[in-house]
Amino acid sequence: MINWPADTLTLAIDIGGSGIKASVINKDGEMVCERIRMETPYPSHPSGFSQVVADFVKVLPKAQRASVGFPGLVRNGIVVMVPSLSRLVKDGPKDPELVKAWKNFDLQTPMTSALGIPTKVANDADIQGAAVIKGEGLEFVMTLGTGVGTALFQNGVLLPHLELGHAPFRQSEEFEEQIGNAARERIGVERWTKRVIKAIAKYDQFLYYDHCYVGGGNAKHIKGLDLGPKVTRVSNKAGLFGGARIWDLEAS
């Protein structure tokens, strides 16, 4: 592990199914410039995706390292699968050719080359979780956006990523199908909020977490403030703030 100096700046990039956000942050997770945003391009083929991102962030101040939060199953910088970007249009059906192209694609290597600095590519929920966890017991992070992201930490250590958003939930559908953005728009905020609360309880049944953090762009739509004593709603900005801290966390 590199012993980064205290004045290290991190280029934090948060890729979602709807938008790509970026900023430069210090080691405390504070932004040193304004955040920038672009719409996620569709279709996005892995062969040129890194250069698209690199061109987008050229306007930001120079940093010494980068973190990229990616909306799919990522292990050691390799994309195992990415449902949201495996489509020709946003919210459209999966395209078999894009599914095949993204499967087991080493995104970290071309992203490092395109950005020109040491780069970590990890699941977006893993990076968001790095910003909010307390490092005590089993902590579960759930992000609500285009889909549903999840991350697990044990005593501050990032555990191997699992795509729990694609686990069975109810009515023969996955969590993502029931509480993703398409479902929120289809059934309305009140019914969607009830589903989210049920989903939080369901995750607790099979994870028995010590605490749960709910973030992502759609967390702001949850009606009511009290999600229970073991649940905290967090800002979507954590997707950027965790970009510095993820460098200090090692997956077991």
Image: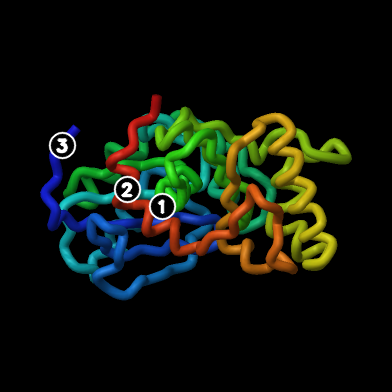
- 241 vs 132, left or right, is left
**In this view of the protein, which residue sits in the foreground, 85 or 22?**
22
Marks 3 & 1, CB-CB < 8 Å contact: no
Q: Residue at the spot x=32%, y=75% of the render?
A: 34
Q: Amino acid at mark 2?
A: Arg
Indicate left or right for 1 with 85 as reference: left
Q: Residues within 10 Å of mark 3 (few under 14, many from 20)?
A: few
Residue 170, x across and y down, in percent: 84, 40
Q: Residue at x 82, y 66 (%)?
A: 190
Decide which of tag 1 and tag 2 comes sooner along the chain: 1
Q: Compare residues 181 and 226 and report the one nearer the observer.
A: 226
Q: Which residue is mark 3?
A: 2
The answer to whether residue 80 is above or below residue 224 is above
Disc 2 target residue: 245
Amino acid at the residue labelled 1 = Ala
Residue at 56% x, 58% y: name it: 216
Residue 250 picture location, percent across and down: 34, 32
